[in-house]
Image (cartoon, rainbow, N blue to C red):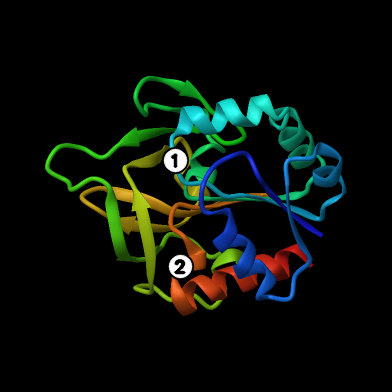
Amino acid sequence: MIAIIDYGVGNIKNVYKAFVGLDLDVTVTADENVINKSSAIILPGVGAFKDAMDNLYKHGLVDCIEKNVQKGKLLFGICLGMQLLYEKSHEDGEWKGLGLLKGDIVRFGEGLKVPHMGWNSLIKNREDMIGKGIKDGEYVYFVHSYYLKPKDEDEVVFWTEYGVKVPAVIRKDNIIGMQFHPEKSGKTGLKLLKNIKEMIG
């Protein structure tokens, strides 16, 4: 069973439908016991970084996520869910994230239309299981105003370009993140979700 963490942010329904469509046993939950029994954890999200972290603390899920990751369980963050994996965000202040990976979430600079919304192509940084079957130049769908500046660029599997190099897919061990929405990214998004399914086993 895969646990999609419900912590009061948007876009959970689409992610749920995408994984159910892959014939996976999925539940939407904020129950620590259910998350602990799951085979993988999905952290989706659309909204503000601070509100999302406040909600995770309110539901007592910060320690829960950390402990499950330390046990080797796969954690997959989507959009805001990917940003939460990192140390801090500069969205309307400076806010602490989960700190599972090293890097900062920063706003796009002057002269770029914000939010970055629409289809952008993927640029491969390195080979990884998560990118199996994905070619350079395939398009995926983004909606975001902030992006990751990673401390370790080797964790980036795919970049995209939007005035700057933007990490699009990251992976370190059992932690995976996608800045875009795979569930809204057509055939390429489906291939990536199938790769997640294989990695969960």
Q: Nearer the viewer, residue 151 or 79?
A: 79
Residue 36 placement (x, y as % from top left): 84, 43
Q: Which mark is residue 70?
A: none
Residue 8 placement (x, y as % from top left): 58, 39
Under tag 1, what secondary structure?
A: loop
Residue shown at the point (31%, 64%) measured from the top left? 120
Which of the 4 quarters of the picture holds residue 131? bottom right
Q: CA distance from mark 2 to mark 1?
A: 17 Å
Residue 2 placement (x, y as % from top left): 76, 58
User: Would you place residue 124 above or below residue 66 in this image?
Assistant: below
Q: Nearer the viewer, residue 5 or 168?
A: 5
Under tag 2, what secondary structure?
A: helix
**Residue underneath mark 1:** 47
Q: Are marks 2 and 1 in contact (CB under 8 Å)?
A: no
Q: Is residue 116 left or right of residue 159?
A: left
Residue shown at the point (48%, 79%) measured from the top left? 187
Residue shown at the point (65%, 25%) measured from the top left? 57
In the picture, which quadrant includes the C terminus? bottom right
User: Would you place residue 75 above or below residue 181 in this image?
Assistant: above
Q: Is residue 90 left or right of residue 132?
A: left
Q: Nearer the viewer, residue 200 or 15?
A: 15
Q: Is residue 4 left or right of residue 182?
A: right
**Residue underneath mark 2:** 184
- Which amino acid is tagged 2? Lys
- Which amino acid is tagged 1? Gly
Label 2: few (<14), some or many (≥20) within 10 Å? some
In the picture, which quadrant includes the N terminus? bottom right
The earlier-in-sequence mark between 2 and 1 is 1
